[in-house]
Amino acid sequence: MALQDLPVMLGGFKLMITEAPSVKLKELEDGSMTPVVDRVSGEEQYVVTLFAKPLPVDGRRAGKGEEIRVNLPGDPGEGFEEGMYVELVNAVVNTYEIPDRNNPRVIASAGLWFKAAGLKPAARPSVVPNAA
């Protein structure tokens, strides 16, 4: 069972654009690429690649971070360039499972993917206050 649209709180992370938003593409059977279009709105979907680095917490070192790709329902607008710090608007995470071809009861692959309603510029916070 895949869980869908679980709200995500990313306030403890710096999110830096590593690849500017671009139209999301999918490969067709003939090998050509075509834009992914939202079934409801008919708009082309976008994707942005972010480096998510945990902020240091008082008394602890920050982790190394990880690159994530985030699906967006449309063009987030001008000014979102590589190196810019952003916040995600209404971020959610979804899970998926792909069964094994030979044995459908076995999960061959599983993972998660992020999506958000949009992007907004963010200040660069330096430390998360200790909640204790």
Image: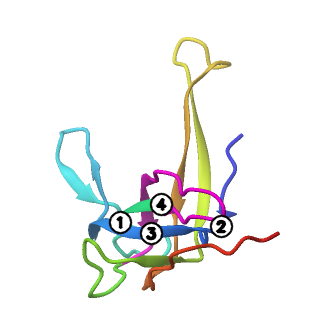
Secondary structure of the residue carrying numbered label 2: loop
Disc 1 residue type (three-letter): Val
Q: Nearer the viewer, mark 1 or mark 4?
A: 4
In the figure, is residue 116 to the left or right of 23? right
Q: Assess disc 4: are there few (<14), some (14-19) or many (≥20) residues with their C-alpha within 10 Å of its C-alpha.
A: some
Numbered disc 1: secondary structure? strand
Residue in the image at 51% along x and 64% along y: 115
User: Which disc number belongs to residue 48?
Assistant: 1
**Marks 1 and 4, how far apart at CA:** 16 Å
Q: Is residue 71 magenta?
A: yes
The residue that disc 3 covers is 15
Label 3 amino acid? Leu
Sequence-wise first label, 4 or 2: 4
Query: What is the magenta range?
Result: 53-74
Tag 2 residue: 58
The residue where tag 4 is placed is 53
Q: How far is disc 4 from disc 3 in space, using C-alphas?
A: 7 Å
Whichever of labels 4 and 3 marks the residue nearer the N terminus, that label is 3
Q: Residues within 10 Å of mark 1 (few under 14, many from 20)?
A: many
